[in-house]
Amino acid sequence: MSTTATIKEKNIKLQITRVFAAPRDGGALQSVKVDARVGGKYRLQVRKDDGEFYTTVGTYREVKPPERLVFTWAFEKDGSGDEFGEVEPPEMLVTLEFRARGKQTELILTHEKFASVESRDRHNEGWNRCLDSLGKFVSK
């Protein structure tokens, strides 16, 4: 596992690379709204244990299965509803690259355009938790 953090003027960036013991095709998310085409939108709604909602929304900018997925990333102000809601700035950008490595897949996640280093660091923790769970899931 490697994590690279780069701070450039007005472009705070996070990049995470993982290799999974699974081919890059397969798998599906169940509790999301997805229109996975260029210009299509997605909505991921998470309800925390304390009852608070974290709802992420965005628009797909590039969809190139099974190699690359690029989408915007922002949070809804009140993510508790069932439909797309008002978005909080800033709108960030996420790029997922999937590289075949024999019977393994290397995932390179790049999340950029953070408003602050603190936001980048919180996302680093969140993405690593998600990728840890994904790694356990695909290893079964």
Image (cartoon, rainbow, N blue to C red):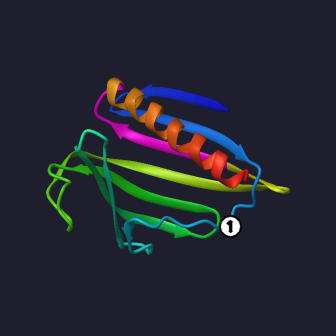
Residue 133, relative to residue 26: is it above or below?
above
> With 107 as the anchor, is 84 left or right in this view?
left
> With 131 as the anchor, is 117 left or right in this view?
left
> With 128 as the anchor, is 39 left or right in this view?
left
Question: How many numbered discs, if any?
Answer: 1
Residue at 77%, 50% (x, y): give it.
Answer: 21
* 23 or 120: nearer the viewer: 23
* Residue 126 placement (x, y as % from top left): 44, 37
**Residues drawn in magenta:** 107-117
> With 110 as the anchor, is 27 left or right in this view?
right
Dominant secondary structure, magenta: strand
* 84 or 40: nearer the viewer: 84
Residue 97, relative to residue 8: is it above or below?
below
* 48 or 2: nearer the viewer: 48
* Residue 83 placement (x, y as % from top left): 20, 68
Q: Quadrant of the N terminus?
A: top right
Residue at 28%, 33% (x, y): give it.
Answer: 115
Q: Residue 115 colored magenta?
A: yes
Q: What residue is shown with label 1?
A: 25
Residue at 64%, 52% (x, y): give it.
Answer: 137
* Residue 125 placement (x, y as % from top left): 46, 31
Residue at 41%, 35% (x, y): give it.
Answer: 123
At label 1, the amino acid type is Asp
Q: Residue 28 colored magenta?
A: no
Residue 95, relative to residue 35: is it above or below?
above
* Residue 110 placement (x, y as % from top left): 51, 43
- Judge the density around disc 1: few (<14), some (14-19), many (≥20) Cα neighbours within 10 Å: few
Residue 44, relative to residue 74: is it above or below?
below
Which secondary structure lies at badge 1? loop
